[in-house]
């Protein structure tokens, strides 16, 4: 049984992704990463609670060892209030060092603590809350097992021709000025597949992605297979809403890069994010992104 995340929950965050992760907990869109806004200096704001409710438990958990991040993370379990649309479930949250304790009551939007980076993060991933929803009798500690999530908010599909100008960079990524968000702050938007739907996921650096059908609802029970392409370049095949990427390579100006990060966003800084730890792009560089079968290279 799928659980719907209402607009009031998602509207607290600047960006979200169901599939942009390498971890099985996200398989089938069974978890969502929620990205709060950032301050002018680039620091991420506090971690707003997705729901009102009572803190059931907090604990420290082990994270994969990475040279750039601690080997521990934090788990917060919330019992949603009776008035919450998620009442009767357990909400499971990672990547927040808790400023709350068992028994505390929180309102939707209250800060749960400080967003942290742990070994679960690739170096190009921004700070976020990882959220899953479970039945009350399910094991809340296992990484996998959360319920499929549907969106109670529409996502506007944006045409993107694969081109753009670099407007910002980090050590492992570059952000383009295209596609531009047509209505920042008022609605979520994402990159449109050629035949419709919004593409979500790490292409192709994670195993697969998602197709948000029509940019509105996720057709969890539709068994049809759909070929997904972008600008005529085949990306893979979607079964229900989950895309299995083909064996493809993403290129930027003809040279291979790790991939492109695709997500849904409502902030004005929306634009394609190139994952390129082995290649540097200067701000102002014009880039053309294509997707090619790895057999062609």
Image (cartoon, rainbow, N blue to C red):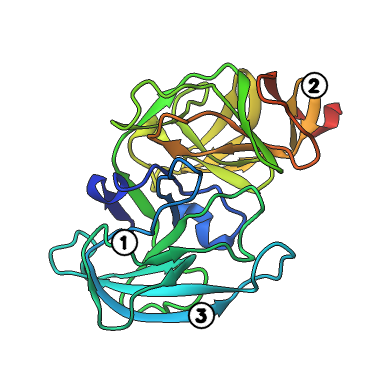
Q: On the picture, is 215 further left or further right than 242?
A: left
Tell me which numbered mark, 3 or 1, is placed earlier along the sequence.
Answer: 1
Measure the C-alpha gap from mark 3 to mark 1.
18 Å
| In-image side of 92 versus 248 (left or right) | left
Percent x, y for residue 29? 46, 52
Quadrant occupied by the N terminus: bottom left
Label 3 and label 2: CA atoms lie apart by: 44 Å
Whether residue 287 is visible to the viewer of this picture, yes or no, is no
- Residue 198: mark in rendering: none
Determine the secondary structure under disc 1: loop
Res 96 → quadrant:
bottom left
The percent position of residue 291, horizontal first and vertical second, equals 70, 27
Q: Name the residue under label 2.
A: 254
Q: Is residue 208 in sight in this rendering?
A: yes
Label 2: state its secondary structure: loop
Sort mark 1 into few (<14), some (14-19) or many (20+) by Cα contacts within 10 Å. many
Residue denoted by label 1: 49
Judged left or right of residue 277, residue 31 is: left
Figure label count:
3
Residue lying at the far right of the rendered structure: 297
Q: Is residue 162 above or below residue 142?
A: above
Q: How crowded is mark 3: few (under 14 residues within 10 Å), some or many (20 or more)?
A: few
Q: Residue at x 39, y 62 (%)?
A: 147
Above or below for 47 versus 217: below
Mark positioned earlier in the residue sequence (3 or 2):
3
Instruction: Look at mark 3 in the image and give the residue it sits on.
Output: 60
């Amino acid at each position: 049984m799928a659980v719907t995340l209402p607009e009031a929950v998602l509207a607290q965050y600047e960006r979200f992704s169901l599939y942009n992760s390498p971890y099985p907990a996200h398989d089938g869109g069974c978890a969502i990463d929620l990205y709060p806004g950032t301050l002018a200096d680039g620091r991420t704001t506090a971690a707003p609670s997705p729901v009102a409710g009572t803190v059931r438990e907090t604990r420290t958990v082990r994270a994969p060892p990475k040279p750039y991040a601690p080997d521990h993370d934090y788990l917060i379990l919330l019992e949603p209030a009776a008035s919450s649309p998620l009442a009767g479930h357990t909400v499971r949250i990672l990547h927040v060092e808790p400023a709350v304790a068992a028994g505390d009551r929180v309102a939707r939007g209250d800060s749960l603590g400080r967003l942290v980076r742990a070994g679960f993060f690739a170096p190009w991933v921004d700070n976020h809350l990882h959220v899953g929803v479970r039945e009350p009798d399910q094991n809340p500690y296992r990484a996998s097992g959360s319920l499929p999530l549907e969106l109670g908010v529409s996502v506007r599909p944006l045409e993107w021709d694969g081109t753009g100008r670099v407007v910002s960079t980090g050590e492992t990524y570059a952000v383009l000025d295209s596609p531009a968000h047509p209505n920042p702050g008022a609605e979520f938007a994402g990159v449109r597949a050629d035949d419709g739907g919004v593409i979500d996921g790490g292409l192709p650096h994670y195993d697969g992605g998602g197709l948000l059908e029509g940019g509105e609802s996720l057709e969890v029970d539709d068994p049809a297979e759909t070929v997904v392409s972008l600008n005529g370049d085949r990306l893979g095949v979607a079964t229900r809403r989950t895309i299995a990427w083909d064996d493809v390579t993403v290129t930027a100006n003809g040279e291979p890069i790790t991939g492109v990060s695709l997500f849904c966003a409502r902030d004005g800084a929306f634009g394609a994010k190139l994952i390129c730890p082995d290649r540097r792009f200067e701000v102002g560089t014009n880039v053309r992104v294509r997707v090619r079968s790895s057999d062609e290279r």
